[in-house]
Image (spheres, coloured by chain):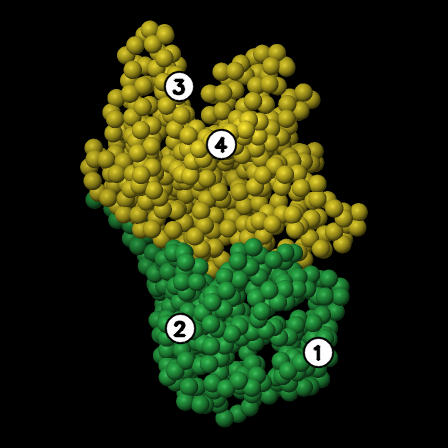
Chain colours: A green, B yellow
């Protein structure tokens, strides 16, 4: 055999070994989506379901946590909340409902609605009696780029299975994570690097523990959020942050939304119809944006979609005979910037005002 | 199996090692088997089509060699062209034709629901050039069916070219190759450079181009200009990146494919652009469409007609849609204009300010024409042209709004854009003078390994990691 050939192959093997070695090492050790290990989430869920307030570590995966929560539940709650961080304050204290659990996850999109409900359907073969659906404008945006629902294969499967059940179809999965081996996945490698850059060594911090300090971000026993005291309590610092962050909202590319997404509306309505047909009581909840934000988004028309989505939701609720609570314009509820944590998250007192308006 | 996939990263080294370990006489068998496996990894059933085209063109080649009767030779040629082009027509142009006819005639035709077989335009043209060359006596007939089949389906250039001529590729398949580490290093390096162009530059710019062109009627002003510029660079890096990987892969087997790109965005006229862009296709159209129609050895009016027809057909080759025809027509009209005013490509030594101005003008024209290549239909193309300069009278507001709408006011995004484009521009500037890859593989090991490592790490960190096909695969 030609010596040059051996030399060339050796060089290629070294490069391949270095590339794949690096990818496998980072993917396995950082494992930001907890594909290889999810034990700490299981521990957190068990602590929470025992009635404790549990600390939310900086690097925990909310979707995996919800899988663990539903898996460890002793019985199905009467009422659940699904949606994004904008609905996380809704708990037993604010709504007055008992036997309730808040399953909201950050950055929820329509696929998350299916995924979260799919958790219950898979375990109980049924759904809770009352479902509060927190709906933000971008949920109905056709080009919503949110992809967190695809980062965990198990969660992704729940979403697909329930989507197929509701829509009577048999979609074929197309997630990269589903087709790629996570050990050698380049997309997972890049995601891990990004998480490491953002969170530093905290990326490894997922220890489950009970919160004994109000300065910590935590989950209440009913799944609702307890922001850290620094964020939850009214202050000049918080107020200036709310006002400075306001402007045209570009979250999830919502500035590009000029009409309701055709497929999103179809998926949303199919879901609502399915829930109603199965005897569930559905409540649509719209969380408000801050006063200054409404000035930009609604008065100056930077986010024309807000009014479009609200009008659609109200018409839908009217047509289906379902209850609708809240609205995107905080001024309708007499809320000022003082009641906000940031431009799109109202605090606990503000949420209570909106819910009971 | 995409060139930028894990499957190909396993497939290519395996074929490479086997190729150099087995005796010369079995190498074409390996290449043939590997190529069919490669093609069937997309859609196994479509291998029948490529086999059909191979068989038809092979036997027509033999028949042409054995008969001297003119009428029989003509009939043989017509049979070959009809059958090969017939397959292409059915799979690529049938729906387009009946949909166009429905605009004029009221009828309900059968609409085909098959996916377009990948690479069908490329391998059809490659087999057609073989049959026509044999007919004209410009190429010897290949008697060995296996070698001929390997020529048709040779995997590095099967899906998106370069469209090779039989007289160039078949002798290389037959030739006894000895392993040459310099050739292999060149091949390896150009594959990495091709991956950089595809995964880092093209796929990341595609995000911006797709954002606007995916919903074009929601945009106007400078954002359309920026998206068009992004697409201009995207398509170059996408296609030339593919070609680089194809050439590098072939070189690993000791086979040299033709260069398909020669810094096209440095062209000083539209005619010059077509001597630098997709060279294998433009020379194909020159040799088998333009010259047979009379080329430039006819009256001026007839020459204009020949140029226009050639470019309209070229547009249609790219896609069965009227926007591609408009795109081809624009290039044809531009060349007619250049011919009428005697505008010729500048010679390399004529580097002056006017040359730079001409490069910018040609680049602007080519970019503008790409709009019709990127849009879904002609109406979208006209919308983009009509609305791209809306608000230009307030120039700063026009620019800043466009930049903000694209998300490029964010320093990270803008910085990454520079990271994508600067190495590409530097590479192309040096390419005008020398083969940069060859220059590079002749440097010492430290330089080679450092640059290779930087490129690989950049691809790993910034390369688009999702499944992204190549733009020209659809043709």
Label 2 to label 3: alpha-carbon separation: 68 Å
In the depicted view, which residue is nearer to us: B58 or A299? A299
Q: Nearer the viewer, mark 2 or mark 1?
A: 2
Write down the quadrant of residue B361 in the picture.
Answer: top right
In this rendering, position of residue B111 left or right of residue B323: left
- Number of residues whose C-alpha sits closer than 10 Å to that of mark 2, classed few (under 14), some (14–19) or many (20 or more): some
Label 3 to label 4: alpha-carbon separation: 37 Å
In this rendering, position of residue B179 left or right of residue A248: left
Label 2 to label 1: alpha-carbon separation: 36 Å
Q: Residue furthest bottom?
A: A212
Residue B328 pos. (x, y %): 57, 30
Residue B243: numbered disc: none
Label 1 to label 3: alpha-carbon separation: 79 Å
Residue in the image at 41% along x and 43% along y? B245
Is residue A296 among the parts visible in the rendering?
yes
Host chain of mark 2: A
Q: Circle 1 sits in a helix, a strand or a loop, which is it? A: helix
In the displayed structure, B388 sits above or below A52; it is above
Q: Nearer the viewer, mark 1 or mark 4?
A: 4
Residue matched to label 3: B132
Residue in the image at 50% along x and 50% along y? B203
Q: Earlier in the sequence, mark 2 or mark 1?
A: 2
In the displayed structure, A114 sits above or below A43; it is above
Q: Nearer the viewer, mark 1 or mark 3?
A: 1
Write down the quadrant of residue B357 in the picture.
Answer: top right
In this rendering, position of residue B467 left or right of residue A268: left
In the displayed structure, B228 sits above or below A272; it is above
Residue matched to label 1: A333
Residue A289 pos. (x, y %): 67, 73
Residue in the image at 69% along x and 61% along y? A304
Host chain of mark 4: B
């Amino acid at each position: 055999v030609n010596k040059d050939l051996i030399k060339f192959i050796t060089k290629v093997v070294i490069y391949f070994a270095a590339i794949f070695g690096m990818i496998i090492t980072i993917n396995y050790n950082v494992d930001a989506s907890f594909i290889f290990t999810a034990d700490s989430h299981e521990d957190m869920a068990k602590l929470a379901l025992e009635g404790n307030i549990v600390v939310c570590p900086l690097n925990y995966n909310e979707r995996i946590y919800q899988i663990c929560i539903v898996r460890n539940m002793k019985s199905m709650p009467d009422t659940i909340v699904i949606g994004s961080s904008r609905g996380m304050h809704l708990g037993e204290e604010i709504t007055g409902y008992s036997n309730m659990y808040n399953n909201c996850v950050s950055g929820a999109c329509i696929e998350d609605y299916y995924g979260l409900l799919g958790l219950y359907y898979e375990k109980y073969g049924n759904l809770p009696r009352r479902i509060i659906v927190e709906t933000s404008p971008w949920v109905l945006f056709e080009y919503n780029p949110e992809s967190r629902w695809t980062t965990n294969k198990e969660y992704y499967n729940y979403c697909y299975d329930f989507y197929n059940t509701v829509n009577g179809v048999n979609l074929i999965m197309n997630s990269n994570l589903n087709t790629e081996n996570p050990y050698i996945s380049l997309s997972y490698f890049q995601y891990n690097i990004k998480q490491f850059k953002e969170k530093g060594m905290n990326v490894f911090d997922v220890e489950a523990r009970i919160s004994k300090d109000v300065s910590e971000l935590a989950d209440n026993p009913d799944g609702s959020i307890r922001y850290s005291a620094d964020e939850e309590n009214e202050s000049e610092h918080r107020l200036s942050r709310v006002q400075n962050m306001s402007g045209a909202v570009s979250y999830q590319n919502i500035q590009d939304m000029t009409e309701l997404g055709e497929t999103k509306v179809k998926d949303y309505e199919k879901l609502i119809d399915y829930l109603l047909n199965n005897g569930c009581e559905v409540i649509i909840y719209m969380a408000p944006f801050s006063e200054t934000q409404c000035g930009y988004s609604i008065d100056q028309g930077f986010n024309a979609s807000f009014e479009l989505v609200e009008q659609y939701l109200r018409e839908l609720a009217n047509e289906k005979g379902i209850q609708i609570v809240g609205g995107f314009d905080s001024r309708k509820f007499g809320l000022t910037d003082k009641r906000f944590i940031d431009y799109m998250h109202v605090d606990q007192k503000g949420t209570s005002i909106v819910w009971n308006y | 199996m995409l060139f930028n996939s894990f499957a190909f990263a396993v497939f290519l080294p395996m074929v490479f090692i086997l190729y150099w370990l087995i005796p010369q006489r079995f190498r074409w068998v390996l290449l043939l088997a590997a190529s069919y496996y490669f093609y069937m990894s997309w859609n196994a059933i479509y291998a029948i089509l490529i086999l059909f085209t191979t068989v038809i063109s092979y036997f027509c080649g033999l028949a042409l060699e054995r008969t001297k009767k003119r009428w029989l030779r003509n009939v043989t040629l017509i049979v070959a062209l009809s059958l090969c082009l017939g397959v292409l027509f059915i799979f690529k142009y049938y729906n387009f034709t009946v949909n166009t006819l429905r605009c004029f005639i009221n009828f309900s035709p059968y609409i085909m629901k098959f996916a377009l077989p990948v690479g069908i335009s490329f391998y059809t043209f490659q087999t057609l050039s073989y049959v026509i060359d044999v007919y004209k006596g410009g190429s010897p007939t290949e008697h060995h069916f296996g070698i001929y089949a390997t020529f048709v389906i040779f995997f590095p250039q099967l899906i998106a070219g370069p469209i090779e001529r039989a007289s160039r590729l078949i002798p290389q398949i037959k030739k006894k190759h000895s392993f040459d580490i310099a050739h292999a290093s060149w091949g390896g390096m150009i594959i990495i450079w091709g991956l950089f162009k595809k995964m880092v530059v093209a796929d990341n710019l595609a995000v911006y181009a797709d954002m606007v062109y995916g919903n074009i009627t929601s945009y106007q002003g400078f954002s359309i200009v920026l998206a068009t510029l992004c697409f201009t660079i995207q398509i170059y890096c996408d296609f030339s990146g593919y070609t680089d990987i194809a050439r590098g892969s072939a070189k690993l087997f000791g086979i040299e494919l033709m260069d398909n790109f020669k810094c096209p965005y440095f062209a000083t006229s539209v005619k010059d652009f077509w001597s630098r862009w997709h060279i294998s296709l433009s020379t194909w159209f020159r040799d088998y469409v333009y010259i047979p129609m009379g080329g430039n050895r006819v009256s001026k009016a007839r020459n204009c007609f020949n140029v226009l027809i050639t470019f309209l057909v070229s547009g249609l080759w790219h896609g069965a849609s009227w926007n591609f025809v408009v795109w081809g027509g624009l290039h044809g009209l531009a060349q007619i204009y250049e011919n009428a005013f005697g505008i010729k490509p500048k010679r390399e030594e004529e580097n002056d300010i006017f040359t730079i101005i001409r490069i910018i003008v040609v680049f602007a024209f080519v970019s503008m024409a790409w709009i019709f290549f990127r849009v879904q239909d002609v109406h979208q193309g006209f919308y983009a042209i009509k609305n791209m300069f809306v608000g230009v009278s307030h120039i700063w507001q026009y620019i800043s709004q466009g930049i903000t709408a694209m998300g490029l006011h964010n320093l990270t995004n803008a910085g990454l854009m520079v990271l994508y484009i600067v190495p590409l521009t530097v590479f192309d500037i040096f390419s005008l003078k020398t083969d940069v890859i060859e220059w590079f593989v002749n440097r010492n090991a430290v330089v080679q390994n450092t640059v290779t490592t930087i490129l690989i790490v950049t691809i790993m960190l910034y390369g688009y990691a999702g499944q992204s096909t190549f733009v020209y695969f659809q043709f």
